């Protein structure tokens, strides 16, 4: 299992706001490895995750997940890939208003057509691992920023995705928690053998991740560990 | 459906509020419908009961025929000679009466020949048989007119013996009392204050009630006999207040049917706009358009159908509470039909917002500004 990006180009916006964010980017991410995606703000980290996550169709290039090109799929099939094979933690706005924590996870199960009853124990276990065992019945608006990110991570992990995409997981947590959270992601990645990409500015993430990919140089390059 | 339920639960305050609005609209439609039917019955139930297909009036009157039309005995006799037609005289007159026990009542005196097809059946007592007898509608019995009572028509002094009670029968919101044509003519044509009827009462009727074999050319008969024949149902408009009430109630109902989809549509419209970020998130997580549309429809159905059912129960309860004191009638088929219309109107309103649900854009999740 691997994720391979070939010649990805993305242009966003119209008219004066038109920006070429990714320009013929090539990158390969191996299964069982968590890669930290680094680079200055605006360098295209979130955009790269969106392309890899079948959320944004690139203007050119291929997104090969286990050899199959996500960029070539119809919109309907990309949605299916998102719900069945990809776990995504967005940079913000991850949670559904009014739903309690455990239901945030089970909503993803629902979307994927899986049994929420069967997955409930797993969801609770996962949330406990994420240090949210005492928050299962809290609503999203009753959580701190860091707690919300952890709920979102739990949701991304619930269905054991082949591809785990995490955008700025540690932006709202303290150093200890940042390290613990990253270790959890990296450990899960190794345990499950999924492909994991973490967009981050955080040196703590960089320190724990298996490898790093830098968006700053042109072309972007893999940093040696 | 699990997710749809979760969302319903999460926004239960709003959905309850919306449900309450649907309940009230549905109940109002039900109540208005009950009064429409009830008032209609109270105005024309006596006419509806007539086992006639058509009524022939004098040709010169176009409105208020029952009060203003007069048809002579010779015209009636000529109608009775027409092939394919059975005809009998019908008299209608509004008056008042008092029983010997001092019960005062308004009544609509219907003059009908007891031997032919207009003769009313009775629920209690004896059928109308001869002059000087009266069979009263159940409503008059409720007001205290009993079998065996003598009912004296005010001012004219015509004395009537109550022999029977028939079912509910009203004309222009006034309960009906059935008398023979001769008695009716005494009531209609007597000079107020005269103790004895004048010797020569005109042998006239308000109309000729007709039972026609389908296909009979009544217009041709009209031309020959100088009458104006209308189908029984069209004659309802001649009853006092019928057209005005019908227009009023129907327009209230029509407006409610228009309001229902607008209110429901506005609610779901606002809700969908507010929910755009969440719809985008659900799409980003891989929810199909079909699933989101299905959820929205399920939620709308729950609110609209649930609200309508409660509203129907409320309207039914109002009907039961009002009882027989007011003209309110809401038979189950009518209730079911009006409630189905409210529900459909509401769902149509919700359907207006589906486009926005389908077009929620998952890439908005990329904007870090959320
Ligand atoms: N809809 C858009 N229209 C035009 N430009 C856009 C649009 N969305 C993003 N951009 C631009 O694309 C570039 C890359 O954005 P992206 O969100 O991928 O950066 P990032 O590396 O994740 O930054 P950060 O570290 O701040 O999250 C930015 O310069 C941004 O201004
Ligand atoms: Mg970003």
Image (spheres, coloured by chain):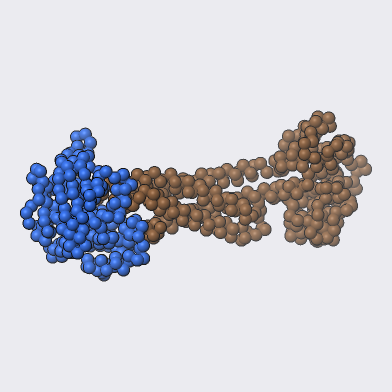
Chain colours: A blue, B brown
Residue A147 is situated, as x and y percent measured from the top left of the image, at 22, 62
Which residue occupies the foreground of this view, A72 or A134? A72
Does residue A198 appear in this view? no
- Left or right of B136 in this view: B3: left
* Residue B223 sits above or below residue B178 on the image: above
Residue B165 is situated, as x and y percent measured from the top left of the image, at 79, 58
Which residue occupies the foreground of this view, B355 or B46? B355
* Residue B74 sits above or below residue A99 on the image: above
Where residue A59 sits, quadrant-wise, is top left
Single out the residue that lies furthest toward the right. B199
| Quadrant holding the N terminus of chain B | bottom left
Single out the residue that lies furthest toward the top. B223
- Left or right of B27 in this view: A171: left
- Left or right of B218 in this view: B173: left
Does residue B133 appear in this view? yes
Single out the residue that lies furthest toward the bottom. A134
| Residue at horizontal 53 percent and vertical 57 percent from the top | B309
* Residue B150 sits above or below residue B76 on the image: below
| Residue at horizontal 20 percent and vertical 60 percent from the top | A193
| Residue at horizontal 57 percent and vertical 50 percent from the top | B338
- Left or right of A129 in this view: B325: right
Residue B34 is situated, as x and y percent measured from the top left of the image, at 62, 52
Single out the residue that lies furthest toward the left. A224
Where residue B236 sits, quadrant-wise, is top right
């Amino acid at each position: 299992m691997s994720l391979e990006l070939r010649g990805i180009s993305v242009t966003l916006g119209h008219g004066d706001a038109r920006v070429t964010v990714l320009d013929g980017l090539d990158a390969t991410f191996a299964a069982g490895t968590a890669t930290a995606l680094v680079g200055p703000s605006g360098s295209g980290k979130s955009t790269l995750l969106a392309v890899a996550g079948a959320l944004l169709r690139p203007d050119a290039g291929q997104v090969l997940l286990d050899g199959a090109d996500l960029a070539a799929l119809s919109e309907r099939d990309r949605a299916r890939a998102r719900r069945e094979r990809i776990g995504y933690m967005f940079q913000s706005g991850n949670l559904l208003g009014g739903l309690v924590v455990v239901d945030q996870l089970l909503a993803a199960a629902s979307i994927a057509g899986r049994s929420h009853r069967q997955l409930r124990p797993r969801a609770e276990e996962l949330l406990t691992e994420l240090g949210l065992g005492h928050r299962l019945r809290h609503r999203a608006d009753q959580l701190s920023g860091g707690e919300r990110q952890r709920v979102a991570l739990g949701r991304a992990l619930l269905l054991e995705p082949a591809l785990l995409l995490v955008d700025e997981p540690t932006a709202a947590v303290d150093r200890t928690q940042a390290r613990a959270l990253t270790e959890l992601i990296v450990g899960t990645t190794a345990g499950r053998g999924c492909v994991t990409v973490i967009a981050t500015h955080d040196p703590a993430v960089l320190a724990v991740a298996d490898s790093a990919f830098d968006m700053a140089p042109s072309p972007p390059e893999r940093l040696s560990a | 459906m699990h997710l749809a339920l979760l969302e319903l639960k999460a926004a239960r305050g709003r959905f309850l509020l919306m449900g309450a609005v649907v309940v009230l609209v549905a109940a109002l439609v039900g109540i208005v419908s009950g009064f429409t039917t009830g008032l209609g019955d109270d105005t024309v139930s006596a006419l509806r009961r007539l086992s006639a297909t058509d009524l022939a009036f004098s040709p010169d009157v176009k409105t208020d025929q029952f009060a203003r039309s007069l048809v002579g005995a010779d015209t009636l006799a000529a109608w009775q000679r027409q092939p394919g037609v059975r005809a009998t005289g019908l008299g209608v007159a509004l008056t008042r009466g008092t029983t010997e026990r001092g019960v005062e009542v308004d009544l609509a005196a219907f003059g009908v020949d007891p031997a032919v097809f207009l003769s009313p059946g009775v629920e209690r007592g004896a059928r109308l048989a001869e002059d000087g007898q009266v069979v009263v509608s159940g409503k008059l019995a409720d007001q205290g007119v009993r079998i065996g009572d003598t009912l004296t028509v005010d001012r004219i002094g015509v004395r009537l013996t109550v022999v029977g009670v028939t079912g509910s029968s009203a004309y222009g919101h006034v309960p009906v009392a059935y008398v023979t044509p001769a008695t009716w003519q005494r009531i209609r044509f007597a000079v107020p204050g005269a103790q004895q009827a004048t010797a020569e009462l005109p042998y006239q009727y308000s109309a000729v009630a007709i039972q026609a074999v389908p296909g009979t050319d009544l217009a041709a008969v009209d031309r020959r006999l100088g009458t104006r024949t209308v189908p029984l149902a069209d004659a309802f408009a001649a009853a006092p207040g019928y057209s005005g009430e019908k227009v009023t109630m129907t327009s209230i109902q029509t407006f409610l049917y228009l309001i229902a989809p607008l209110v429901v549509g506005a609610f779901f419209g606002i809700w969908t706009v507010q929910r755009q970020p969440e719809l985008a998130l659900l799409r980003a997580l891989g929810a199909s358009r079909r699933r989101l549309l299905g959820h929205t429809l399920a939620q709308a159905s729950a609110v609209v159908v649930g609200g309508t059912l409660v509203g129907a129960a409320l309207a039914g309860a109002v009907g039961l509470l009002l009882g027989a004191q007011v003209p309110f009638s809401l038979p189950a088929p009518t209730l079911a039909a009006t409630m189905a219309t409210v529900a459909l109107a509401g769902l149509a309103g919700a359907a207006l917002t589906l486009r926005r649900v389908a077009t929620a854009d998952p890439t908005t999740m990329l904007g870090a500004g959320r």
